[in-house]
Image: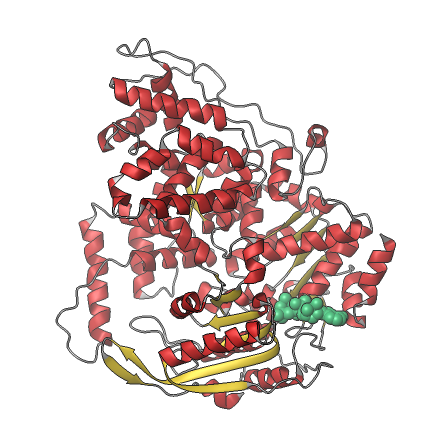
């Protein structure tokens, strides 16, 4: 072990080693791109572990879940044992874990098995609450109409405004990132749209989430901040627990994340942040450079270490990147250098039109893979927007070049049959997840919307979950006409046992029984609160067919609830899911074989997890982040936005569509004009992902609705 840690330290430079050994005051590693910031942070973690610090005493916040697993792996390879009870994760995953622990969610009025909404479900939720609110919808329609007229140079009569649900979702996310609660007073400085959302939607939205036991991603962090503020004993527990705190990519912390972090840090001196002000690219999401630029004001006796040697890129790439970023005025400025080779020249290509650009890039990629034996996962196409990435898909498919689209997974989870299968799987683990039940019930043969509504209402009247009512209906076979008095079968779950919790945080970990008392995050388990006879008043009459079908589902759910993920196919078969697929009218127009295949793919993902719970939690939390299985990853080129490529590196990087308006982007209609310095940082992040070569390209023309548009090349090209 000590040999390993010595090797690790030997491979670092002097400043990096200093950063690893420094623990006497708040430390900021303010360093340039590719200088080993992330490497240093991970090494510091491993070093602490190797010195005998217990994993649960180190809080490590990474930018992606992937980076979290990487950190875990490195520490494990050095200590050669599984990292137990570690607290490595993203703001979201760490908050989700804290919220679920010891039933603290109850203090924000959530109940067990709350359902986490992704963006798509957020949008549907807003649509639902505004369904009968014509007045509110009209306000937004009028706003859209006004914006359209303002921005349109020519009169276009055919325009019909639609209610901007997706935009409302982004707006609410933005409020949360700025630490604005729905019950706060209206803050100054909102624009017209934000004001409309704040006054007419935000509160209704939050209240509907609470009443339906739902949270969105922003809530995970926001609720923890609220709990930390209102329950000092909980904050104190974490402050005492975390002796060391490590945080990557702090230049992009938004106000919400900053607050979360500052609360947990308290006056802890042993914390290390790393960041680069030249890579601030999330300004639009409410991030501020304030944390990094004013670090010394925020934290007394702060120590700053600078790293200047870039280990990633060739001299050529670094020079171009430096040329570009030096045009920014708002920066601390640094002196980056590298000992790497001069390397290949930068390839700047001009094409006649978009399609030629796409074709040629795909052709060059084929050459790299086939003629030069470049591993596909060392090639990336990085675009400014998701949509631009999608334009490459068709050609890559035709060329037979495997690719990973970073937003792939999100799209996949939206497919109807996949979504439905997921709800069936969710209720195996989370019996009180009413949101999931609601999506299942009307699919049960014989059940219509009316019956579902009755069950939902009955649950509300009984102040219980739908699961209790369903169980009651399914079990009460003999005596169906009289209202029943029955012990509620679904006890409230006790707080998640620590072993399950730790295992969840660490998929590879097998925790034995007696671990449950270990570790400082253990706390006395609360007795289940309403583990008493619950008297249910159920006035719903099911016919024979309904009852049979429901009983079958409930029985199979009981049988399969604690099984392994490889049993899921059997579960879905037994409950008649595949029959439903074949018959269902929603999905009928689709090829049934394709439907089956999609579900099959989902089950394959599931099998990568030890148990169903891990799988369900993973999907709920991490569907934000893309990419498929590890195996497909190594064989595929990467297609992603520059934003999601942050922190990553590839041998060869393609940066297409560098024309004015696309890079730097110019938002249309009412979106604000892009901040040119932030766009430049974005271009800079793109270029600096490359180790060996960069291929930047642009086109002269594109087609838009049968209209040919002429383009000018990006101003950034001249600057580099
Ligand atoms: P970014 O700004 O893009 O987040 P970073 O500063 O976090 O980059 P890393 O990703 O940690 O940089 O490191 C960049 C590359 O340099 C990696 O391949 C890493 O292994 C390598 N590297 C870091 N430090 C050293 C070192 N002392 N000697 C050799 N290689 C190093
Ligand atoms: Mg990094």
Q: Position of residue 259 (x, y in %)?
A: 55, 55
Residue 38 placement: quadrant: bottom right
The residue positioned 56% from the left and 40% from the top of the image is 231
* Residue at the extreme left: 157
Q: Is residue 282 above or below residue 271?
A: below
Q: At x 17% / y 80%, what residue is drawn?
A: 154
Name the outermost residue toward the bottom: 718
Coloring basis for residues: secondary structure
Q: Nearer the viewer, residue 175 or 365?
A: 365
**Residue lying at 39% horizontally and 59% vertically, measured from the top left:** 187
Q: Is residue 119 left or right of residue 164?
A: right
Q: Residue furthest right?
A: 3
**Quadrant location, the C terminus:** bottom right
The part of the image, by quadrant, that contains residue 156 is: bottom left
Q: Position of residue 139 (x, y in %)?
A: 21, 58
Q: Position of residue 685 (x, y in %)?
A: 55, 74
How many labels, in total? 0
Where residue 19 appears, as percent x and y from the top left, is: 76, 65
Point out the quarter of the image occupied by ligand 2.
bottom right
Residue reaching furthest front?
371
| Residue 162 appears in view | yes
Near-viewer residue (667 or 564):
564
- On screen, residue 423 versus residue 547, left or right, reads right
Picture residue at 41% right of the left edge, 46% below the top: 597
* Residue 464 shows in the view: no
Foreground pick, 664 / 174: 664
């Amino acid at each position: 072990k000590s040999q390993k840690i010595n090797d690790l330290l030997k491979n670092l430079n002097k400043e990096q080693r200093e950063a690893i050994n420094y623990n006497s005051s708040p430390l900021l590693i303010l360093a340039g791109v590719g200088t080993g910031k992330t490497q240093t942070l991970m090494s510091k973690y491993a070093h602490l572990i190797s010195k005998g610090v217990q994993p649960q005493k180190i809080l490590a916040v990474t930018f992606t879940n992937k980076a979290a697993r990487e950190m875990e792996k490195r520490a494990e390879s050095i200590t050669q044992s599984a990292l137990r009870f570690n607290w490595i994760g993203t703001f979201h995953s760490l908050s989700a874990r804290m919220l679920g622990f010891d039933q603290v969610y109850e203090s924000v009025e959530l109940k067990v098995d709350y359902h986490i909404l992704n963006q798509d479900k957020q949008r549907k939720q807003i649509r639902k609450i505004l369904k009968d609110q014509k007045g509110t919808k009209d306000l937004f329609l009028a706003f859209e109409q006004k914006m359209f007229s303002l921005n349109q140079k020519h009169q276009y009569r055919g325009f019909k405004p639609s209610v901007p649900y997706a935009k409302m979702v982004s707006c609410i996310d933005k409020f949360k990132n700025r630490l604005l609660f729905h019950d706060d007073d209206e803050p100054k400085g909102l624009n017209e749209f934000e004001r409309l959302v704040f006054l007419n939607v935000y509160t209704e939205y939050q209240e509907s989430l609470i009443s339906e036991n739902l949270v969105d991603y922003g809530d995970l962090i926001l609720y923890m901040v609220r709990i930390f503020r209102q329950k000092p004993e909980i904050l104190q527990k974490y402050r005492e627990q975390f002796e060391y705190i490590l945080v990557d990519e702090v230049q992009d912390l938004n106000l919400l994340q900053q607050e979360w972090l500052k609360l947990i840090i308290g006056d802890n001196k042993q914390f290390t942040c790393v960041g680069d002000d030249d890579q601030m690219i999330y300004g639009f999401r409410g991030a501020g450079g304030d944390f990094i630029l004013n670090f010394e004001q925020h934290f007394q006796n702060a120590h700053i270490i600078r790293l200047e040697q870039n280990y990633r890129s060739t001299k050529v790439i670094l020079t171009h990147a430096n040329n570009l970023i030096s045009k920014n005025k708002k920066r601390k400025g640094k002196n980056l250098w590298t000992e790497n080779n001069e390397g290949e020249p930068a390839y700047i290509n001009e094409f006649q039109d978009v399609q030629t650009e796409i074709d040629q890039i795909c052709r060059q990629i084929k050459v790299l893979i086939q003629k030069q034996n470049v591993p596909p996962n060392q090639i990336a196409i990085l675009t400014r927007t998701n949509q631009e990435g999608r334009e490459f898909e068709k050609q890559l498919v035709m060329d037979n070049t495997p690719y990973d689209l970073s937003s792939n997974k999100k799209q996949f989870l939206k497919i109807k049959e996949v979504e439905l299968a997921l709800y069936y799987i969710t209720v195996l683990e989370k019996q009180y997840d009413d949101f999931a039940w609601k999506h299942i019930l009307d699919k049960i043969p014989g059940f219509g919307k009316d019956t579902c509504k009755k069950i939902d209402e009955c649950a509300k009247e009984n102040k219980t979950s739908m699961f209790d009512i369903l169980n009651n209906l399914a079990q009460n076979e003999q005596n169906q006409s009289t209202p029943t008095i029955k012990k509620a079968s679904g006890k409230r779950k006790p707080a998640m046992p620590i072993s399950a919790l730790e295992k969840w945080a660490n998929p590879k970990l097998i925790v034995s029984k007696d671990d449950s008392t270990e570790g400082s995050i253990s706390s006395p388990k609360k007795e289940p609160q309403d583990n008493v006879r619950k008297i249910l008043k159920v006035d719903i009459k099911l016919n024979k067919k309904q009852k049979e079908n429901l009983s079958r589902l409930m029985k199979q759910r009981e049988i399969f609830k604690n099984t392994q993920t490889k049993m899921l196919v059997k579960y879905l078969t037994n409950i008649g899911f595949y029959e439903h697929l074949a018959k269902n009218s929603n999905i009928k127009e689709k090829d049934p074989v394709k439907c089956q295949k999609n579900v099959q793919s989902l089950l394959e993902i599931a099998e990568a997890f030890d148990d169903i719970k891990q799988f369900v939690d993973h999907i709920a939390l991490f569907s934000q982040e893309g990419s498929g299985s590890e195996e497909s990853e190594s064989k595929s080129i990467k297609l992603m936005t520059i934003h999601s490529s942050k922190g990553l590196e590839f041998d060869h990087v393609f940066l297409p569509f560098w024309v004015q308006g696309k890079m730097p982007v110019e938002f249309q209609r009412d979106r604000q004009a892009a901040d040119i310095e932030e766009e430049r940082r974005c271009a800079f992040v793109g270029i600096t992902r490359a180790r060996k070569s960069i291929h930047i390209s642009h086109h002269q023309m594109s087609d838009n609705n049968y209209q040919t548009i002429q383009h000018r090349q990006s101003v950034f090209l001249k600057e580099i």
